[in-house]
Image: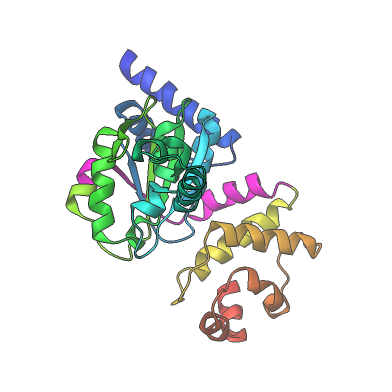
Amino acid sequence: MGPMGDQLDSTLQTIRSDLLRAGYLCDNQLAGSIHLAMKLERPLLLEGDAGVGKTALATAISEMVSRSFIRLQCFEGLDHHDAVYEWNYGRQLTEIRLAESSAQTVDSASIYSEDFLIQKPILKALKEHDGAVLLIDEIDRSDEAFEAYLLEALSDYQISIPELGTVKSTVVPIVILTSNGTRDLSDALRRRCLYHYLEYPDVSRETEILRLKVPEADLRLIEQAAQFVNTLRKEDLEKKPGIAESIDWLKALTLYGLQSLPEDPVSLRGSLSCLLKTARDRSDVSDDTLQRLFG
């Protein structure tokens, strides 16, 4: 490996170490995507099933770079009033009435100033003097119309407010978009972003994550819990348990005082409320299924 390769490897290792200190276990491929997103000042689109750690990664990056964390939770019908800005019409109306009561005139410039502007996540991120990490969470829940608006805002990291003019970021925010794949995103948005797909961790990796998050647990119990959850995810479930559910389950087992899983798995049925989050999944994972999964 030449000097350039050595430098890149060192950079990726630094990112992995910094994220680990923030509580996030990261491989070289993901570290490379993060590195490029920051250097190229491009949004990073993270896709994957719910619970694979997309949102947790954004918060860890915020801690890694010591920037404020700003989150925009997407939903159907989301528009710029929820995502970017809106005017405080109540304060504007009060200002007009006060002026009228004292026989003064109010010009539009005075009531359409920043004093009456309510900043929403995207505008907050653009105006953050020290930079921000902006998480646009579950972009697939928003409409295509909002996607188009977002694309414009992310192309030059600026937005237009008709009454005030153009607002451009002084420090380009680190933008993380997440998608659970509930609908196809536009080609235009994908072209604008760097892309990384996050999968559920394998047994070895999940064991590492559980050791990091629940260090007080016995190693044997950690390994068995990781193996069981990995096997459980292969079942036909409505909602597969994510990493957060694995951590909660291991914490519950530790609270029970267990150092390893018991020979009779049925005795743990009560703890499965940490892993199985729908009525159908609770019903389908019968005692016989538990016996089979525990092997």
Q: Is residue 203 above or below residue 77?
A: above
Quadrant placement of the N terminus? top left
Farthest residue to the top: give it: 3
Magenta residue span: 190-215
Quadrant where the C terminus sits is: bottom right
Nearer-the-camera pick, 6 or 14: 14
**From the viewer's perspective, is 276 left or right of 1?**
right
**Display colour scheme:** rainbow
| 188 on left or right of 116 | left
Task: Check the image and report above or below for 77 versus 264.
Answer: above
The quarter holding residue 174 reads top left
Q: Which residue corresponds to the image point at 64% horizontal and 73% vertical from the top-left?
A: 273
Q: Residue furthest right?
A: 257
- Tell me: 288 left or right of 239: right
Name the spot of residue 50 as percent of width and height, x first.
Answer: 45, 61
x then y, percent, for residue 164: 32, 35
Say which of 208 and 24 sits in front.
24
Residue 227 shows in the view: yes
Seen in the picture, residue 156 relative to 86 is either above or below; the reply is above
